Amino acid sequence: MVKRAFAILTAAVLSLSLGTPAKAAPEAQPRQQWRSYWVDAFNEGIYTPAQVTKLVQDAKKIKANALIVQIARRYDCFCNRALYPRTDAAIAPLPYDPLDEVIAQGHAAGLEVHAWVNVNTMWNSATPHSSPEHVFNKHGLSATGADRWLNKRYDGLELMGANAYMDPANPGAVNYIVSAIQSLLREYDVDGINLDYVRYPDFNSTTTHSDWGYSETSLARFRAATGRTDIPLPSDPQFSDWRRMQMTNLVRKIYLGMWEVNPRARLSMDGITYSFGPQTMGGWEKTRPYAEVLQDWKGWLAEGIMDTVVAMNYKRNWLPDQKQMYDEWKEVLADWQGDRQAVIGPALYLNDISDSVEQARLALAPTAAGNTAAGWSGYSYANPTQAGVNQPPSVRDAERDKLVEALTVGPDAPFADEATVPVMPWKATPTEGHVSGRVALRTGTPLDQVSVTLRPLTTGGKPITRLTDGDGWFGFVHLRPGIYLVHVDLPGRVIGQPIAVAQVRAGAISKVDLTRLIRL
């Protein structure tokens, strides 16, 4: 052993004397762990270039690697080149473009930028937006029939105060939502889209069902699908399942719509975690996210139509019941993410610094099953601690710096080291493909809620059946490459070729055209 050690030492000395560089030890790679702030647009943060500079500097201090920035607030855009009209908020005048500025400064600093888009919140002010093209002006209280995109409650209300909501069962609204998101991806180099309010509204009579979904369009489509003629109760299981399916169809259409424009862009969403988790409630189907606001984010992760759930786990760590709620949701989020990713999003504004640090540690710790959440996102940048809420900017800045120190300084600090945003293998190096299409008559009339079955011919596996949405659209995601048969179960008095063949290729969408059908 002594001789061998001496030989190694001699060789090292000789290599130095001869000028041959010794091999350096491989550098340790940064861990993959999502770290971000939510940056809401109801507070300053992106209103001017100077605010963006400060935002990026503050994000780097906390060793963040991403920013979730509210860009489409209430169908008004903090940007200049999207389908949404530019916001009337008091941002710097044209040609300033907040999204351009965040992308330029954020990317230069090594931060990913995710455009936060509110989906089903149409408007929230007694003063209309200045643009006649805003959805509330075109499809709100002044519109009729299918052009009225407002969601309606069981008691007939469409406004809660000044708050108006989009109806996810309205085909025109759905197509606008998808097109607007695609416009952001086409015009801006964002790393992803973050969906907020991708659910039915609050303001329900109980926590066990939703009182929303009673627009004329929604009820007509439900009756056409089921053959019923009544007005279902909010607690009606069939109606709840149908409304929940409208949300899932919307998410699937957004997912594939994004893939068409930028297959690498991440789709994330702000997952609801109201009250206790499924451990206490008796299963996922009895929790408030699933039962009350009809948001099946667990199913979206399982199907693969959601890349990342950034869960709004807004709980007060200093209240025992809410601490239990936080723990329960953290556990299932990490365990349910499967091949996708779940990020824990605590409410900084509800806690002091020590509680926020404790919640961060828990968010990143393994579960009993050994699973670890994909990361952490703090809500919000504007209000980093409970002590800073409603305080002057100088106080909030000081609180933010204290939080940064607590989270980053010291070997035991949750963010002591650097981290990179987790890779999405299913998008970075895809091995699966997708199928989408549309079923319609030659006249252009879509066939709504008809069954489309996808049968694998060369890959094995079971057939999958989906219903078309209100525009006749259907989609199947993450399929093994190969040949598939697409079969449509046509309604009575419609004839045509109800069968097509789709060749699925890795990373691509195979388009199927079934729009030449004839009604006798």
Image: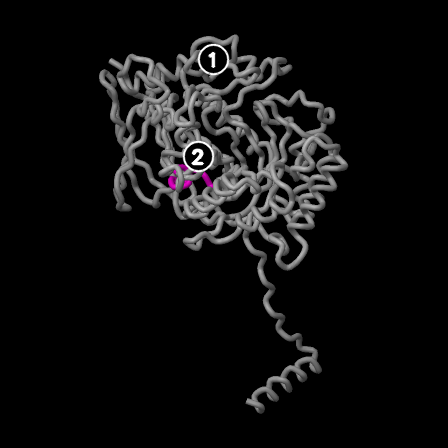
Count the marks: 2
Left or right: 77 in relation to 453: right
Residue 112: image location, x then y, percent: 60, 43
Magenta-drawn stretch contains 385: no
Res. 355 mark: none
In the image, residue 187 above or below residue 223 = below
Q: Amino acid at mark 2?
A: Leu
Left or right: 192 in relation to 385: left
Q: Amino acid at mark 1?
A: Leu
Res. 157 mark: 1
Q: Which quadrant, please, contains the C terminus? A: top left
In the image, residue 340 above or below residue 183 = below
- List the residue tagged with mark 2: 256
In the image, residue 146 above or below residue 352 = above
Q: Which residues are magenta?
A: 299-307
Residue 83: image location, x then y, percent: 57, 24
Q: Secondary structure at mark 1?
A: loop
In this rendering, which labeled residue sits more in front, label 2 or label 1? Answer: 1
Residue under the image location 66 percent in, 39 percent down: 385
Q: Quadrant of residue 252?
A: top left
Q: Nearer the viewer, residue 476 or 389?
A: 389
Q: Quadrant of residue 490?
A: top left
